[in-house]
Amino acid sequence: MTINSLNTTIRNQILNQQIHHFITSELPKTGFEPNGKDKQLNFRLVEGLERLIPLYQNIYHTHPKADQTFEKLIQTLVDFAQKRAPELQQRDNSKKPQWFLSNELAGMSLYVDRFCGNLKNLSAKLDYFEDLGINFLHLMPLFESPSGESDGGYAVSNFRKIDPKFGSLEDLIALRKAMQKKEMYLMLDIVLNHTSHRHEWAEKAKAGDPEFQDYFYMYDNRWIPNEYDAAMPEIFPESSPGNFTYVPECDKWVMSVFHNYQWDLNFMNPAVFVAMVENVLFYANLGVDLLRIDAPAFIWKQTGTSSQNLPQAHELLRLIKQCVAIASPGMALLGEAIVAPKEIMKYFGTGDYSAKECDFAYNATQMALQWDMLATGDTRVMLAAQHDLMQKPFGTSWITYTRCHDDIGLGYEDSKIAQVGKDPFLHRQFLKDYYTGSYPGSPAKGALFSSNPKTGDARISGSLASLCGLEKGLENCSQEEIDRSIQKILMMQAHSFFLGGVPMIFYGDEIGYTNDYSYLDDPGKSYDNRWMHRPVIDWVKNNRSKELGTIEQKIYDGTKKLLTIRKSLPVLSDLKNLTWLSPHNIHVAGFLRAFGDKKVYGVFNFGAETAFLTWYAFKGHGKTPEKLKDHWTGSEMQVGMDNEFLIISPYGFHLLEVIND
Ligand code: GLC
């Protein structure tokens, strides 16, 4: 029966009946036992379909193959749920709801090959993570990707085959099992928005197969591409300008928003949606705890718009959330939406779907604002942005970070900069000059990434250590500069670890790796300066973290200490329990994390001079504290009078727990 032309309510009712029939009559033919072994699954299915059906219908009801593809989707969910290994089903059941809000989680993001060669070697490195206090690993893309046209693995040519340079699926499963024995969690990426042009689907499209040409946005001429281009920004304007690539094999134009070898998948085609849900669930069944959905802002395109953050992109994510809740309920979702703050918030879900879209997003705004504060010594732009960030719904969380494999985008709104009386253009210009080291006296050493001469936009590449001044300090053989850079590194990490959310350290930053310029000699990387901050780990250097007094030791032990403190304080769980202080000192960022009678204040001096913070800053949040324990220095302090001060050294910080007598 075709139900496309009916109104939504009637259509959903009919579909519900069809589904009921499908579950009770068709599925049992394939061995599904709603009252037996599949009882739990049946329960999730019936419950989940209530949400899933209208979401699916909203997006696909006009597509001629909507109904038959929907049945395929349900069958897919059932198949993957049934194939889920018993130990993963057990893990699903034993995970507390919102297990990921805990203060006991701390992550590291790493490239397996650059960290230790391959997956087998990584199994042997678990003690390293344990020692540092890391129990959550984000392994950068592992699936097959053509070398030289890989975008660090984000151009996937086979979603099911581990790139042989890392090892095999068996190695990954063995690693995951070893990690679980140590109560560690695994995060992998699903690159949802695009495939490599060498993926089987793309190869078939090139060969002229119309079914697979429909998997991409492919056009015979430039008419529609021109229409899209008119409103779409460019992501890599230097290395890959425009949003379409000519495909000589089939004489067509294909949408390629990122690099020209990354072809955008056409989610208007429900077959693409189901095929990608299969990949999502394949990863779920490998034992992924948190799935990082790469570039979700881009998954729906529409001419006349920027083709980012469109409502249909959110509907697709909600749909994926429902599919996961049915087939692999223990896996959480992270939306990697590095977009304006107001837009980021929507990835947690809005309206009826609040907290029912992505469980996590990157706190990219706060990350960028930390770098803003570090350069300017001024916290006001950061504070102006908090109103939006505080809207995050309870039950969802942030990935908090100072650096990752990508550039630092300065994507917060101009209005926040203007609000504190600064000129947005000049302010951004200053930040770019500061972090590329061209601003007089700047200790930073980074580079502009993806400068767009048409718009003046640019982002920043560079490692945490180099942007904090360690590279220049070493070049200048200046102990003072080196010490100051270490202080900045630890303050930046402390600020992001204590703010709320799961801290995600970028590998190498725990040791203070400076920029690596060897990427310039590799033609597959030289066009992309993000490789300067993706180090190849030298284990001799890392082992210096055990020698007292080395730079490596100071940064490693400082980072470890911060993670230990975080784990010791349950009040730091992400319970939507963050309040910003008004410290009456623009150089000092201060917040309170409170739950029940537990309170922890974090105060951070982003200024280059000693800061004086009136004790008044600690008042006005319930009972005035009398005594504070600084977990960073180990000292205890008495809260003084309003006209007395807590003195904070340049780039110093305190993690102050209220002591209840
Ligand atoms: C994400 C990744 C980035 C990649 C892009 C395209 O933003 O983090 O590294 O270049 O997606 O896949």
Image (tube, rainbow, N blue to C red):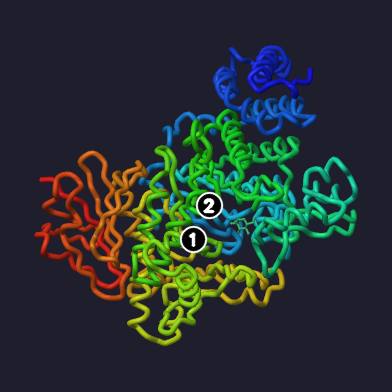
Q: Residues within 10 Å of mark 2 (few under 14, many from 20)?
A: many
Task: For the N terminus, give its image quadrant.
Answer: top right
Query: Which residue shows up at 55% across the image and 55% down it?
Result: 122
Task: Please tell me in which quarter of the rendered image ligand 1 is found.
Answer: bottom right
Residue 293 on image: x %, y %: 59, 46
- State left or right for residue 615 relative to residue 498: left
Q: How crowded is mark 1: few (under 14 residues within 10 Å), some or many (20 or more)?
A: many
Query: Which residue shows up at 53% across the image and 69% down it?
Result: 460
**Residue at mark 2:** 138
Residue 252 on image: x %, y %: 86, 54
Q: Does the residue labelled 1 lie within 8 Å of ligand 1?
A: no
Q: Which residue lies furthest to the bottom in this view?
A: 476
Question: Dividing the picture into quarters, in which one does residue 474 lie?
Answer: bottom left
Question: Dividing the picture into quarters, in which one does residue 17 lie?
Answer: top right
Q: State whether residue 540 appears in this view.
A: no
Mark 1 secondary-structure assignment:
strand
Query: Which residue shows up at 37% across the image and 57% down it?
Result: 384
Residue 645 on image: x %, y %: 15, 65
- State left or right for residue 294 relative to residue 492: right
Q: Which numbered marker is on residue 447?
A: none
**Residue at mark 1:** 506
Q: What residue type is labelled 1?
A: Phe
Q: State whether residue 113 appears in this view.
A: yes
Of residues 637 and 544, which is closer to you in this image? Answer: 637
| 92 lies above or below 460 | above
| 45 lies above or below 619 | above
Q: Which amino acid does label 2 sit on?
A: His
How many numbered discs sit on the rendered protein? 2
Task: For the C terminus, give its image quadrant.
Answer: top left
Of residues 346 and 497, which is closer to you in this image? Answer: 346
Residue 606 on image: x %, y %: 32, 68
Task: State yes or no: discs 1 and 2 in contact (Cβ < 8 Å).
Answer: no
